[in-house]
């Protein structure tokens, strides 16, 4: 677990930290799957006009990601200290994985 939250000057600086916090392959996979499912559920919520799917998106996305942190990484999710940069990191990890630039 972490001590006090560190301040990052840029997203790239934060993202280096983010990648270090997602070193375990199962954790990375859980993040990619969780982010993917969350995006699909958000799109379905908008298309079907079903707001409850937004709650399902949060549960899927954060549930899978936090499972990776607590059971595989044994660390505290960066979401608690850096929620927006953490979300941006999740999207970047997903994009890099889908593009083949990040190991699945």
Image (cartoon, rainbow, N blue to C red):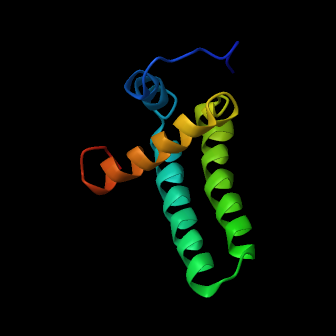
Rendered position, 86 above or below 40: above
Residue 95, x across and y down, in percent: 34, 52
**Residue at horizontal 30 percent and vertical 43 percent from the top:** 102
Q: Quadrant of residue 76?
A: top right
Q: Is residue 1 above or below residue 41?
A: above
The x and y percentages for residue 66 are 66, 44
Q: Would you place residue 52 above or below residue 90 in this image?
A: below
Image position of 20 (left or right of 98): right
Of 28 and 91, the residue lying toward us: 91
* Residue at screen point 68% across, 53% down: 63
- Residue visible at 68% across and 37% down? 70
- In percent of width and height, residue 55 lies at 73, 66
Q: Farthest residue in the left direction?
A: 100
Q: Does residue 28 appear left or right of residue 1 in this picture? A: left
Classify residue 15 as left or right of residue 6.
left
- List x then y, in percent, for residue 11: 43, 28
Numbered marks: total: 0
Q: Residue at x 62, y 77 (%)?
A: 45
Say which quadrant the N terminus sits in.
top right
In the displayed image of the protein, which residue is found farthest to the bottom?
Answer: 48
């Amino acid at each position: 677990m972490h001590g006090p939250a560190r301040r990052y000057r840029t997203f790239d600086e934060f993202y280096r930290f983010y990648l270090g916090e997602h070193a375990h392959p199962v954790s990375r996979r859980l993040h990619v799957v969780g982010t993917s499912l969350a995006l699909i559920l958000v799109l379905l919520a908008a298309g079907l006009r079903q707001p409850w799917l937004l709650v399902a998106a949060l549960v899927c996305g954060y549930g899978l990601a936090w499972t990776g942190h607590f059971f595989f990484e044994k660390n505290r999710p960066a979401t608690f200290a850096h929620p927006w940069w953490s979300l941006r990191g999740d999207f970047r990890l997903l994009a890099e994985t889908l593009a083949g630039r990040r190991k699945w």
